Amino acid sequence: MIDLYDALKNFPALSRQLNCKGMLFTQYDCPQTTHKEGFFVERSFIIYVIRGRRIFHKDMKTWDIKEGVCAFVKSGTHTAERLGNDEWCVMAFFVPVDFLKSLMAENRGRFPAINSTSVVSDHVILLDVDEFSKSFFFSMLPYFSQSPPPPENLVELKFKELILSLLSNENNRHFLSYLNTLSDDNRQSIEEIMNNNYRFNLTLDQYARLASKSVPTFKREFKRLFNDTPAKWVTKRRLALATELLERSSLRVGEIAQECGFENQTHFSRLFKEKVGESPLQFRMQRYSVNKDT
């Protein structure tokens, strides 16, 4: 599991970048070599594809992120699928939630009110790019090679310009709807964070960072909420999902193990048999026989 934000921030040789008050502008070529690769981000980011293509996966949904596409990717876990030998050159803008909330507060009344029923729940929000926004992206390229780098206040203004240019586009009202919810201080609960990310192999520290809490506080609140440890809860949720997929899908056992976040099929089969008393394949065949007879 790649910690994308940390990798780019702590290893500047991987990308051209600008830093400002916890925000990170980057332009990089992704070296992904595997067909599918999971990644984790503790803060949301806006991505604009200069060249190449990837398919993002999350909760049985997919998004085609290709040349010219812009998207807002929420914090948490995702899977990127590489197609053939496609390269992947992108600009990514990592934005702390407090910056987004502050920007929305500063511009309250500038944008139309959006009905709360239109709030976007998807983890990847595709954004329309008009000529104004497109010119912004390409105007950023010289800043990455400027020496000395531009002052922080200018970088901050460029972040604001990016967000406001996207929000000024009427085709991005769904994005405006989502950002409006942030102004209500509706941070993700621990329950939401766990349900959204349990299928990926995150560390306890990464879960705590998503919840904006220290590890001891996270563990204490988790125990109070679930009366269980995070590790045991994650295993139970993965097994519950696997049981559902064995009953209702045509995925192979190995594919189910991968989909549910287990290390491998052997590990999954062992845990499943300990809980259910039979192997995943035996469980599926038994349910198939029952359904056929009825």
Image (cartoon, rainbow, N blue to C red):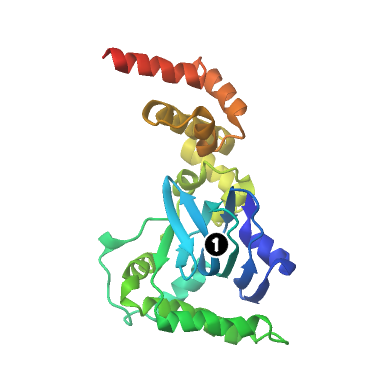
User: Badge 1: how crowded within 10 Å, few (<14), some, or many (20+)?
Assistant: some
Q: Amino acid at mark 1?
A: Arg
277 vs 108, nearest the viewer: 277
Judge by depth and name the residue closer to the eye, 169 or 184: 169
Instruction: Residue at 55% x, 85% y: name it.
Output: 139
Depth check: give the residue in front, 120 or 246.
Answer: 246
For the question of whether residue 203 can be seen, the reply is: yes
Q: Residue at x 49, y 20 (%)?
A: 281
Q: Residue 31 in the image: state x and y as whole percent.
A: 66, 59
Image vertical order of residue 37 relative to residue 41, above or below = above
Looking at the rendered structure, the secondary structure element under dot 1 is loop
Tell me if 234 is positioned left or right of 132 in this view: right
Residue at (46% x, 47% y) in the render: 196
Residue 263: which quarter of the image?
top right
Residue 147 located left or right of residue 269: right
Pointer 1: what residue?
43
Q: Is residue 95 visible?
A: no
Pinpoint residue 169: horizontal percent, then vertical percent.
Answer: 35, 78
Whole-percent x and y of residue 231?
A: 58, 36
